[in-house]
């Protein structure tokens, strides 16, 4: 993969999602009812402009605008909800690829572990494969019950390192690559929602001494020229524009 590939992929995925969103809305909504609701809103707005000097007509039109808006939102709510649920899970999965950059050979990174007790912190030991090297002594944080190591990798690869404490041990995957790969910044306990957003690895034991292990992957920014931002910002911007274009092209009422 080239350096520009993530930006191009975000652009392509955003357009595809924009198309899928409007098509899904089309087949999960009452298109005729939505069209009628929008036409009625336009008529009431026109009445406000045409009869500005007639207070009763204007007040009545505003009341109908509020009622028409509520009717439109009711018609659009369920199709939007049906579309948002799969899109949310898609964004979570895409973020594993576009949200962070993998480590590079020779690039120092921080590895941190959160433990249950101060004694566990003091006895924590980092066990590294031959390709990874700790470049500084461990930093112990007694307040947060955590330990931080600075590590560097010699070459590309998928590595598993181990942290041992109090007779227990847990592993954490580390990816060193120049390619676009699926990353898991953190390994945590069995909290489903936190694991869904931050981890692709098996949950740590709930009753274990080691509560979380995280790798400080660099945040990725995508874009063109000097316009760089988190991929989600571009995703929403491009998919929204694509959705409006496809909506008009396909004659879909939204």
Image (cartoon, rainbow, N blue to C red):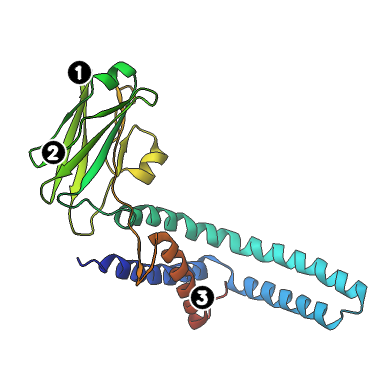
**Label 2 to label 3: alpha-carbon separation:** 51 Å
Q: Nearer the viewer, residue 187 or 129?
A: 129
Q: Are marks 1 and 3 in contact (CB under 8 Å)?
A: no
- Density class for disc 1 (Cα within 10 Å; few <14, some 14-19, many ≥20) is few
Dot 1 falls on a residue whose secondary structure is: loop
Q: Is residue 62 above or below residue 205?
A: below
Dot 3 falls on a residue whose secondary structure is: helix
Q: Is residue 222 above or below residue 182?
A: below
Chain-order first, disc 1 or disc 2: 2
Dot 2 falls on a residue whose secondary structure is: strand
User: What's the residue at 35%, 22% (across, down)?
Assistant: 142
Would you identify the image quadrant in which residue 233 lies? bottom left
- In x, y percent, where is residue 235? 42, 65
In the picture, measured across the screen, residue 83 lies left or right of residue 161, that is right
Which label was assigned to residue 133?
2
Mark 1 or 3: the one toward you? 1
- In x, y percent, where is residue 220? 32, 57
Mark 1 or 2: the one toward you? 2
Location of mark 1 (residue): 167
Q: Quadrant of the C terminus?
A: bottom right
For the view shown, which residue lies furthest in the left direction?
130
Which label was assigned to residue 244?
3
User: What's the residue at 23%, 52% (across, down)?
Assistant: 102
- Density class for disc 3 (Cα within 10 Å; few <14, some 14-19, many ≥20) is some
In the picture, measured across the screen, residue 184 lies left or right of residue 128, that is right
**Label 1 to label 2: alpha-carbon separation:** 23 Å
- In x, y percent, where is residue 77? 59, 60
Mark 2 or 3: the one toward you? 2
Total marks shown come to: 3
């Amino acid at each position: 993969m080239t350096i520009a590939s993530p930006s191009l992929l975000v652009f392509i995925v955003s357009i595809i999602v924009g198309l899928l969103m409007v098509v899904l809305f089309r087949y999960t909504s009452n298109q005729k009812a939505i069209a009628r609701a929008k036409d009625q809103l336009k008529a009431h707005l026109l009445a406000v402009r045409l009869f500005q000097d007639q207070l009763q007509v204007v007040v009545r039109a505003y009341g109908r605008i509020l009622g028409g808006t509520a009717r439109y939102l009711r018609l659009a709510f369920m199709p939007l909800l049906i579309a948002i649920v799969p899109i949310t899970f898609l964004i979570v999965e895409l973020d594993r690829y576009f949200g962070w950059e993998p480590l590079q050979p020779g690039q120092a990174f921080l590895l941190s572990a959160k433990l249950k007790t101060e004694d566990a912190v003091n006895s924590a030991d980092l066990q590294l494969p031959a390709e990874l090297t700790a470049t500084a002594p461990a930093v112990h944080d007694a307040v947060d019950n955590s330990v931080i190591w600075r590590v560097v990798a010699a070459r590309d690869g998928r590595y598993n390192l181990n942290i041992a404490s109090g007779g227990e041990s847990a592993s954490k995957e580390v990816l060193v690559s120049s390619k676009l790969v699926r990353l898991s910044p953190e390994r945590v306990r069995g909290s489903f929602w936190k694991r869904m957003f931050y981890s692709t690895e098996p949950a740590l034991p709930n009753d274990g001494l080691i509560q979380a292990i995280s790798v400080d992957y660099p945040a990725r920014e995508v874009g063109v020229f000097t316009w760089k931002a988190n991929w989600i910002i571009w995703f929403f911007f491009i998919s929204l524009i694509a959705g409006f274009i496809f909506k008009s092209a396909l004659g879909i009422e939204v």
